[in-house]
Amino acid sequence: MIDFSLIETLRWQPGEGFIRLRLHLARLSRSARRLGFPQPVDAAAKLDQAVAGATGPLRIRLTFDAQGRIEVTSAAFVPLAPDTTWIVRLAETRLDSADRLLRVKTTRRAVYERARAEYGPDEADEVILLNEHDEVCEGTITSIFLDDGSGILRTPPISCGLLAGVLRTELICQRKARVGRLTLADLDAGTLYIGNSLRGLIRANLLRH
């Protein structure tokens, strides 16, 4: 029995609508197909209902379960200042690159919650997870991007055991990012960014000790 739902977390902006909506809906549909869920045909309409009459930026969370039920919740969204730098730390918790569910965004988040709980909110803004081969994978709520001086950001391949993030997909499609394995030594040698579709790219400072 499948005891989890698919999730999409989107940003809605007055005058712009949903940011990266097409990519979010495409991922939801692809994930549903992969897991044998019905197709989320009502997703766009449910999202539109959730923002009817909205006047300020919103964080929208859509869940979709194996029975085809869609739930949408919204909350006010406050964007980060453009010059924000997040402090990130490394988790002891490891991801298993063979776990194919890591490639799908679901409510099954125990491994990420365990990693996040290794540090208090005052110690880290985000926590990065490695896999069993010591390869860099992702943050608990973000994809990883490295500026290695080549002019194109490098981001870990899905095969390492990580989510196909919507921002990650967009940057790859725009040829602003390319897929390449990352080690901790790589992170120490380049400029680190993390990000997701909700917040965009965020400069990050990795503290190793």
Image (cartoon, rainbow, N blue to C red):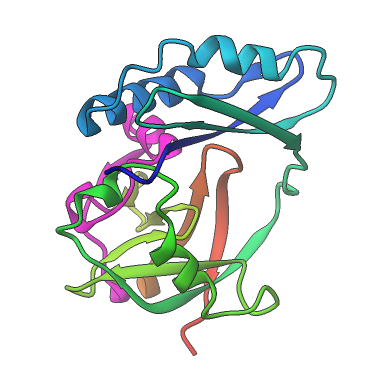
49 relative position to 142: left or right:
right
The residue sitting at 62% across, 64% down in the picture is 86
| Above or below: residue 190 compared with residue 74 | below
| Number of numbered markers | 0
Residue 191 is situated, as x and y percent measured from the top left of the image, at: 45, 62
Asked if the magenta segment contains residue 157, the reply would be: yes
Residue 131 is situated, as x and y percent measured from the top left of the image, at: 24, 69
71 relative position to 110: left or right:
right
Closest to the observer: 4 or 88? 4
| Above or below: residue 71 compared with residue 205 | above
Residue furthest front in the image: 1
| Above or below: residue 155 compared with residue 85 | above
| Above or below: residue 9 compared with residue 71 | below
Which quadrant holds the N terminus? top left
Residue furthest bottom in the image: 209
Asked if the magenta segment contains residue 190, the reply would be: no
Report the magenta residues as a range: 156-185
The residue sitting at 29% across, 31% down in the picture is 31
Closest to the observer: 23 or 69? 69
108 relative position to 101: left or right:
right
The residue sitting at 38% across, 57% down in the picture is 146
Residue 76 is situated, as x and y percent measured from the top left of the image, at: 79, 37
Residue 101 is situated, as x and y percent measured from the top left of the image, at: 26, 48
The residue sitting at 28% across, 45% down in the picture is 103
For residue 136, which quarter of the picture? bottom left
